[in-house]
Image (cartoon, rainbow, N blue to C red):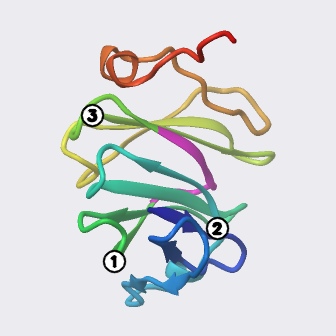
Amino acid sequence: YGFMGGNPAILLRTSDGGASWKKCSVDTSTVVYGFPINKFRFFCNDYGMACGGIMDIAGVIWTTTNRGLYWSVKTIAPEPINDLKFFDSLNIFAIAGDYEYGTSVLKTSNGGLNWNYFNIGVFGICLLYTSPSPRDLSTSRMPSSA
């Protein structure tokens, strides 16, 4: 599967390597459902999140538990979410930031039902890098040399 999003947030899904794209169903009960998407991350084929938002308005997480057919939407910060990392299905780490609020770290230990928000006092927009987890290492392969 593959996914595409952007500004404005339109969630598209492909299951044929990008030959065709279909709109995903999205919870439209809040105004933030249409905010820009910055990144997609999946824990497994069924369970994934997208992140994004608008500066000075809201940081948003979109969550799917059915391979991206339906996405729920939740505001979790006052600035855009730039990236996120799954440590396991419940423990997730996100980084947010803009030039007014600065950089923030968000953590959940219950799969995104609740998020803890910490402003770290660094102004600007930061990107996220974490070293590979044992799960990442067990599923990745180094390219073979020819």
Residue flagged by tag 2: what amino acid is it? Ile
Disc 3/disc 1 C-alpha distance (Å): 23 Å
Q: Residue at x 50, y 73 (%)?
A: 14
x and y percentages locating residue 87 in the rendered image? 32, 28
Quadrant in which residue 135 is drawn: top left
Disc 1/disc 2 C-alpha distance (Å): 27 Å
The magenta segment: 76-84
Disc 2/disc 3 C-alpha distance (Å): 25 Å
Q: Residue at x 42, y 89 (%)?
A: 28
Query: Does residue 127 appear to the left or right of 43 in the view shown?
Result: right
- Quickly name the residue at label 2: 57
* Pointer 3 or 1: first along the chain: 1
Return the residue nearer the eye: 57 or 34: 34
Within 10 Å of disc 3 (Cα), the crowding (few <14, some 14-19, many 20+) is some
x and y percentages locating residue 43 in the rendered image? 32, 43
Query: Does residue 26 appear to the left or right of 31 in the view shown?
Result: left
Residue 52 located within the stretch drawn in magenta: no
Label of residue 69 in the image: 1
Return the residue nearer the eye: 96 or 133: 133
* Pointer 1 or 2: first along the chain: 2
Residue 78 located within the stretch drawn in magenta: yes
- Quickly name the residue at label 3: 91
Quadrant in which residue 53 is drawn: bottom right
The rendered magenta stretch, by its main secondary structure, is classed as strand
